[in-house]
Image (cartoon, rainbow, N blue to C red):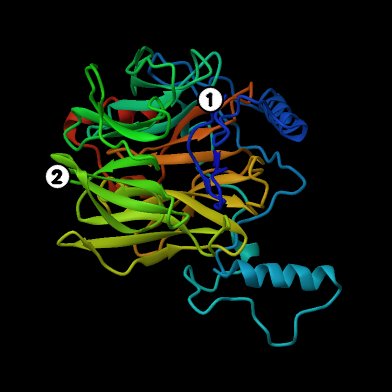
Amino acid sequence: MKWSNMPGVAVFAVTLTTAGCSQFYNGGLGLRHEERQMVTAYHQAQQQPNQQPGQAQQAEAVPLDPVEPVQVRTPDQQQVDFQSPDPLAADASAQAQAAGHAAAPGSSMVGPLALYGQVEPRLVPRSSPLDGPENLRRITFAPEGADFDPALDPTGKLLAFASTRHRLTSDIYLKRVGGTTITQLTNDSANDVMPAFSPDGSRIAFASDRAGNWDIYLMDIRGGQPIQLTSDPSQDLHPSFSPDGRRLVYCSYGGASGQWEMVVINLDEPGSKRFIGHGLFPTWSPVEDKILFQRARQRGTRWFSIWTVELVNGEAMPPTEIAASSNAAVITPEWGPNGQQIVFCTVINPGTDEQERPRQADVWVVNADGSGRACLTGGRFVNLQPTWAKDGTVYFVSNRSPQGQESIWAVRPDPVGQLAQPSPETVGEPAAMVPTP
């Protein structure tokens, strides 16, 4: 989770946490007291006699840490309100209630767009039936530190992620989804984060501060010396490949504008850059020249919403807002494997404290036109950084392990997962994560 301390900007976004870098947080500082109580209560509930023995056993050799669908909640937990996309209206309503004033008869806090339809917040499920042991699997098991920034290769068989499991600074690792061994891809004393696979799966782009500030690098998945693609004084993060593998988009903190900017470069000529708009964590569609990103609905705040922008002959068209909430930051969107769905996170009441970690974060999926919203996680933990594999499995970072450390987990959205059927060569590895009846 990142709370940016850059001058003149307050940014909320999901990435890594590293010691010695004030921009980032990775859970290494430990849990708050109430979070520790929540984790303890959750795992105590797992040991109750009504738990079915062997309920979460699966065919693969990887040990599992099952999640029982119990309702363990912090007192301040809330539901995400997609009804009104205007956080200012929500703040005004809350202030009026705190002052003892009721809303005027006939008044409505519903915004004019009502992006998800006129659904009363109280009708939104408070937990997800998908967040249970039969549909959830723990993927990484770092004995120390944290695993984060998951990325899947085009086949869905290989997972890249950043981790502080071996030292306070992070490196990039590779792991077979159905395996137990990991390969350390980078080994630098600085921080390497946010890996992204090329469309052919042969290369990985990532961000690193090894040159003194955050820049974009490119390397072969077999190893070797990374190539530095950017070297400006700006902070460059979160690379993403175009479908043809010839271009990269990333976000850069612009010194002149005081905002995060999205930049496209050609890998054959990385010095030539094209600004395409303001936004964070851009992700290129796997099937077309369209980029998904998050942007603050009000400059200088953490009330983020999700947008897309289409590129026509390299030029950015007017952006389209896809998802917004009145009481949550809607963040870190990623495309589904066919470009028709989006997975993202919500953080209730993101607040203003740049060092405060979120108290509630959940993973959602939605169609690219804003319809068909569904929650994948049950709201009991901080669930962040989702990414979608070819077979429809969603991988994400969660602090739901017994120790409360951040690890990578996987959930199969059903029936959403049926929209991306695995190809014959991938059957038996990623698809085996979901036990058959």
Instruction: Report if the CB atoms under discs 1 and 2 are less than 8 Å apart.
Output: no
Foreground of the two, 265 or 14: 265
Tell me what residue is drawn at x 17 percent, y 39 percent. Answer: 267
Q: Which residue is mark 1?
A: 55
Q: Which residue is mark 2?
A: 244
Looking at the figure, which quarter contains the N terminus? Answer: top right
Which disc, if any, is residue 396? none
Image-quadrant location for residue 40: top right
Residue 102 visible from this viewpoint = yes
Residue 80 located left or right of residue 280 = right
Q: Looking at the picture, does residue 189 appear above or below residue 418?
A: above
Foreground of the two, 154 or 266: 266
> Looking at the picture, which amino acid does disc 2 mark?
Asp
SS for dot 2: loop
> Looking at the picture, which amino acid does disc 1 mark?
Gln
- Can you name the residue that lies furthest to the right here? 100
Q: Position of residue 84 (x, y in %)?
A: 57, 70
Tell me what residue is drawn at x 18 percent, y 59 percent. Answer: 314
Q: Position of residue 68 (x, y in %)?
A: 60, 32
